[in-house]
Image: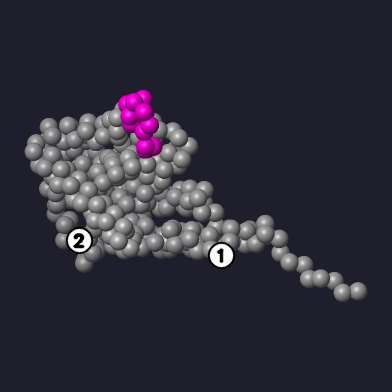
Amino acid sequence: MDVAPRTPSPYAKARVWRFLALVLCALFLASVAGFYHPGVGFTALIAIPSAGHDSEIPELRALPHYHYDTIAYDGQFYAQLAMTPLLRNAAIDRALDRPAFRARRILFSWTAYALGLGRPAWILQAFALQNVLCWLALAWLITRWIPPESPRLFALWAACMFSHGLLWSVRFSLLDGPSVLVLAIAVRAAERNRTWMTAALVGVAGLGRETNLLGAATLPWPHGVRGWLKLVAALAIVVLPLAIWQDYLWSIYRGASIVGGAALLLRAAATASRKTSCAARGFPWA
């Protein structure tokens, strides 16, 4: 008697694709491990140039860390901010290329300071690795929207997690990856109609990059007078953290912090407007 071949169940197929997603995560972590160097840890992920050694703050100069001869990237500035998160060390102004601009994006310097328990050596390693932790958290969170349980969903999930921008953020300890994670959590809160939590998360994200405040677009469109009042209150929560920090920076840098922030917000608004216009005309990638 002929027996029909047994076909794998949909659940079994889903497990295969989930397993492949875990394999990709393992490969990601293996790649990160390649940046470890004895004596300096994971500081190769920050891209600190040897040419700028004389302008480093004393806390960084006293620590063994990896230097590049020809590579430099923004992470070096925020790593040093993490060691003096309230800008009380005057040497930080010599270490930063644009002190008022860099200091405004303080959030992920604060998180590195907290993860490093205030100890410079630990702070430096925490700053180098917090992008890795954010990548892993985002990989899990995105499965809430794109569970890798079929070839198409697996491809979409992998395209998100292994996009150039996200990997570049991990490679050079930038602010983009952690910002995406906070905004993704805000979107999740918005989906659950938690307006106040969404506003608070977007407001906190604004301390990482002021352009993150555009995440306020996730707030629900109001209906009626009560809805408009709730939206106004939510928008006040969105801008409050950056406004308070900006006031603190004003006491240090005076007009430089205000002018720089206004210029960046105008540029972000112009970029968003251009992309919307291009998308409307059939060019969504512009």
Amino acid type assigned to the residue bearing label 2 in the image: Ser
Q: Is residue 129 visible?
A: no
The secondary structure that dominates the magenta segment is helix
Identify which residue, 191 or 273, lies in the foreground.
273
The residue beneath circle 1 is 151
Residue 170, percent from left and from top = 36, 56
Whether residues under marks 1 and 2 lie with C-beta atoms below 8 angstroms apart, the answer is no
Residue 12, percent from left and from top = 68, 60
Amino acid type assigned to the residue bearing label 1 in the image: Pro
The segment highlighted magenta reads 219-231
The residue beneath circle 2 is 50
| Residue drawn at point x = 9 percent, y = 36 percent | 254
Vertical side of 163 occupied by 195: above or below: above
Residue 214, percent from left and from top = 29, 44
Identify which residue, 190 or 127, lies in the foreground.
190
Q: CA distance from mark 1 to mark 2?
A: 45 Å
Marks 1, 2: nearer the viewer: 1
Position of residue 36 in the picture relative to residue 53 (left or right): right
Number of residues whose C-alpha sits closer than 10 Å to that of mark 2, classed few (under 14), some (14–19) or many (20 or more): some
Identify which residue, 80 or 136, lies in the foreground.
136
The disc label shown at residue 140, or none: none
| Residue drawn at point x = 87 percent, y = 74 percent | 2
Quarter of the picture containing the C terminus is bottom left
Quick one: SS at disc 1?
helix
